[in-house]
Amino acid sequence: MDFSIKTFDAKNTISSSKSGCIVVGVYENKKLSTAAKALDVSGAISAALKSGDITGKAGTTLLLRDIAGIGSERVVLVGLGSDAKLSEKTYLSATQAVAKVLANIGAADAIIALPADEVKDRDINWAIQSAVLALRETGYRADTLKSKKDSSSRGVKKIAFAIPAVLAASVKTTLVQSQAIANGMELTKDLGNLPANICTPSYLATTAKKLAKDYKMAVEVLDRKQLEALKMGSFLSVTNGSVQAPKFIVLKHMGGKAKDAPTVLVGKGITFDSGGISIKAGAGMDEMKFDMCGAASVLGTLRAIGELKLKLNVIGVIAACENMPSGSATKPGDIVTSMSGLTIEVLNTDAEGRLVLCDALTYTERFNPAAVIDIATLTGACVVALGHHNSGLFTRDDSAHDQLATQLLAAGKASGDTAWRMPVEEAYQEQLKSNFADLANIGTPGAGSVTAACFLENFTKKYTWAHLDIAGTAWKSGGAKGATGRPVPLLTTYLINKAQ
Ligand code: BES
Ligand code: MN
Ligand code: ZN
């Protein structure tokens, strides 16, 4: 998909402009938006409204063809609700409806002339980015492994946003950023959607190497021997039952000054989580191929900032392996020694994410990071707590961490990829006590997503750290099953803000 900006003036009018399709808004009380008025030279649009063919309700659409007196072949009317105020929600449902229409018509190009600068409490940059992400989401197909491809050749490929001339400069930057975010999300979705027999730890490593080549990043992939030398006993304990080789991936985008402390993104990369000896129930177990979505979001975010040539030092760290049962698998009750030296009693082999992350978090100390954010499909309990709207954001609550939390929450709000803050508190450590080791890998019942975060906290004492539990937001189940690309928008927006 190709996006651009179009500005209109007295000479170069919206009605004379030639395109395969032009999209304008109409309101519930039969009022026309400014752009719709400009196209209503023959009265065809007001007639359509009057006839009741379109109500103007948010998200309704009507396609008209060959209207006399205008240059575009088609006009798509889209409902914007009440004309009193254009809310964020109404605008989003309108853009989603437009994306669906544009995906299914014969036009090669389209102009979207919605009142993007009139959304309440939001600016035009937000509106344009939301539209780009909605259009790219609708155009996304997970059909690389189908012998008959979904009808992706159809649909509009070239889209211009009609905007006021004074806003063109800032929207131009937004378009570049939005497309980078969409490209990053696409990589994250592709990796998430691939099955575990293809998207192995080695496949993730190959993808990281390809990114390094494409965007001039440094990459390092550590194998089992090197992980043993680093004494990553916790990470390695998860891979014991698998025939797939574990990979520890370090991908560096050093766009800032050499001396600047990097921001480190640490991703959980369990390419399949069977639960191990504490094996999961059969129903829906296929979805545990998505247990590497944290890792995929790290790669997607690095892709986005690589494309943007972001002036910031960002390091991606990924602990990738499978969690499988076998005669050599870790058993409940086994005690392992983490890279930090802390011993861990593995009471449940299905709580493996924290076991791979703790060693990755200890490894990360060597970068003297400005901030560390880990991203993980860590707990089913987080889905119980927050559902599928918000990722869980966990940080300590001193002022440095409050500041990091505020920045991450704001980045989520701005990009429509929201998170909700949850506690990290000393009191919960009580639940992680073991009779035989320094820590147990599961907590006593209650606050499962919090005790998981508090487990990780033990390994993050040396830097400012946040944990994003994306168990409820990284993929969708049911008929819409598939990776979402979250939290690439949140992370990329946070990093863009930080680079400014
Ligand atoms: N990958 C899962 C978390 C998960 C489960 C994400 C379902 C999304 C949907 C994780 O490794 C896991 O199995 N966690 C256990 C922890 C428990 C054993 C303390 C869980 O959530 O049940
Ligand atoms: Mn698990
Ligand atoms: Zn898992």
Image (cartoon, grey):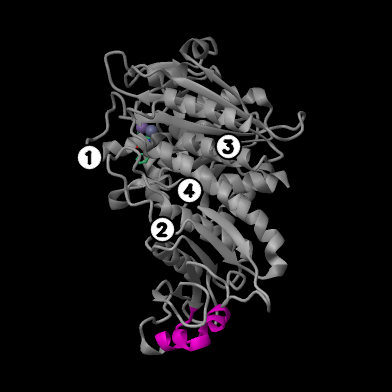
Q: Give the mark, 4 or 2, whose residue is nearer the N terminus.
A: 2
By secondary structure, the bulk of the magenta-drawn segment is best described as helix
Left/right placement of residue 26 relative to residue 144 reads: right
Report whether residue 111 is seen: yes
Q: Which residue is tagged 1?
A: 283
Residue shown at 31% from the left, 39% from the top: 287
Q: Give the mark, 3 or 4, whose residue is nearer the N terminus.
A: 3
| Cβ–Cβ under 8 Å for marks 3 and 4 | no
Q: Nearer the viewer, residue 351 or 53?
A: 53
Residue 39, percent across and down?
Answer: 53, 81
| Label 3 residue SS | helix
Looking at the picture, which amino acid does disc 1 mark?
Answer: Ala
Residue numbers of the magenta segment: 26-49
Q: Which mark is residue 155?
A: 2
State the CA–CA distance, disc 3 to disc 4.
20 Å
Q: Which residue is tagged 4?
A: 391
Q: Which residue is tagged 3?
A: 302
Q: Give the mark, 2 or 3, whose residue is nearer the N terminus.
A: 2
